[in-house]
Amino acid sequence: MNDQEWKELGVTSYNDITAIQMQDIFERIRLDGLNLRQTQAAIRTIVDDDCCSQLSFFDVLHEMDRRYFLRQDLGWEFAMLDYWKNGVIEIEEAEFLMKAVHKDYYSERKWKKFLKNRPVPEAKIAFEEIEVDLCDVPNPQQIQQDLEEEIQEALEQEQLLQEQLKQHKPEVDKEDKQNRQDEDAVKAIRKRQIQEEIALQQKELDFIIKEEELKRKIEEEAAKIAEIELKKQEEAAQIAEKKRKEEEAIRIAEEQKKIQEEKAVRLAEEQRKIQEEEEAIRLAQEQKKIQEEQEAIRLAEEHKKIQEEEARVAEEKRKKEEQELIMAEQAAKELALEKAAQQQIEEQKRKAQEEKEEQSLSNAELTDEEANIKKEEEDAENKEAKKLTEQAKITSLDKSRKEAEEELISNVKSAMKSNDISRLRSALKELKKAKIENSSELIHKADSLLNMWLLRQELNMAIHERQVPKLEIAIEKYKKSTFTAELQHEYTQASDVLNRLKRLDKMRHEILSLKQSTVAEIRSYQKPHIDIHNIMIATYILLGYKEKQLQDWKNLQALIGKTGKEGLKRQTTTIDPVTISKQNADRAYQLLKPLDIEKVRDLSSGAATFYVW
């Protein structure tokens, strides 16, 4: 590691990494971390000092990691002995746990010293009092030193007894010397000498008695020492037997625990299968509901189309009636013109007849040849009048037809500008039906525009309904069409919605595939990392919960632990994104924006799944 990395960890001195710094660094690796006593013990185990250097940093870190996992296991063992669940156990049970952990390296002298130094030696023992001693690596040299100290204490006691015995011997020698002096001094007095001898003999007898008493005491002490050694051997045998029984009990307990764990795993697997079956049934019901909704939408669309068709037919009928009315008016005009022409012809005939009669009267004397000539002239005049009448009629019909054709073309052009699909469809149908000359180009443009409008309508409808199959069909039609430039905006929107729906569907499957143990792992955190806490807050905000109650991790733990309809997996896989308010979405985005997916995945794979969702 370079200097910059050490500085990021808060280490500025090569040989002076304190226990508090090591504790802070370890909390970045393990969420719960270690307490200060365990950290100090780990440093003393490696370097036998209160601080460690960068050279021994990783060895201390490995020792802290060992103590971290061993502390968790021993905590479970302590909890098994804590029958009343009040956090303390009896002294005998604590000693039993200490013997079970250290086995051959257990030191009774060290245990008695620990009990003696407690504020209340007879009180029950908490796990925090013995966790450091339990996690310490047994040291054979320390055990040997304790045994040597015990032997040394026994030898000192024996030496003390011998010294007491030696203290009496100088007194006896002094008395003998004094007696000899007294004997030399009182040789003249026989009576006094006898008395002195009797006294001396009495003292000697007392000394012998005391010496015998001291020997007897020494022998008794030796017998006691031998008895103590015998008792130690018996206790060692009892401890070995007790240890064997304890190991047997531990083995039986482990087997029972293993059986219970297997049973729990089997029950959890059965529960998971039941949940998966329930989830499959729920998904089938939801799929059925979606199909029913799609069928209802389809029926509504068909009904809408029928209404549009009826409206279009009514519009066509109205236009046809208007056209028929126009034709009737034109026919009435033509009939009126024809009548006027007929009246004019009859008037001309009448005038011609009158002129003929007048000429007959005035020219009665004309010859037959002249009469025939006049008759031919009259016929020619009649034919000319009839021809003029027919031409006037044809001109009137052509004018009416031309006006109708111009009106049809005008209707199509107006519909092309109106952005009304049904109006354009109806006007285009009338124009095709009329078969007007030189209208093919207009019909082609109108057809192309109508198809583009229909495709745009289909894309917008698919975007609004947010259904993957309809979006895929509409996008495929767009790619095959010639309107890629005109409908680029709608295509982009549809593609974005489709990609988001596919990602959401993928996330739903990932959440469904999450094991319940992964969700339980998130719930089990007592003090979760701030990133994990923010991810779960954002998740429940999107589900519609108030942020205020989510700030307390205990409330989040309660929500994560719910099952059924209120379960986390059920809610996240069934929610419709359309129902999420913009305010909640913006707040969730603010919480998740600073996070990094790789860092989140390192912290918790389950939290990473909800982060991506």
Image: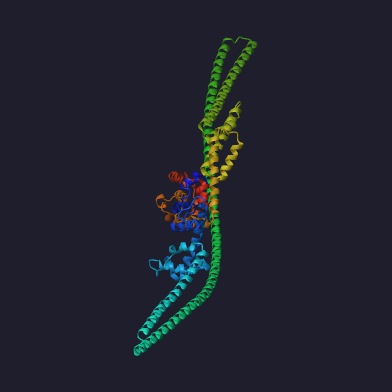
460 above or below 254? above
The extreme bottom residue here reads 191
Residue 254 versus residue 493: which sits nearer the camera? Answer: 254
Visible residue check, residue 69: yes
Residue 15 versus residue 24: which sits nearer the camera? Answer: 15
Residue at 57% x, 40% y: name it: 474
Residue at 58% x, 40% y: name it: 475
Number of numbered discs present?
A: 0
Visible residue check, residue 434: no
381 above or below 45? above
Residue 372 versus residue 95: which sits nearer the camera? Answer: 95
The extreme right residue here reads 369
269 above or below 209? above
522 above or below 361? below
Side of 207 where 389 appears, left or right: right
**Where residue 10 sits in the image (x, y, percent)?**
45, 47
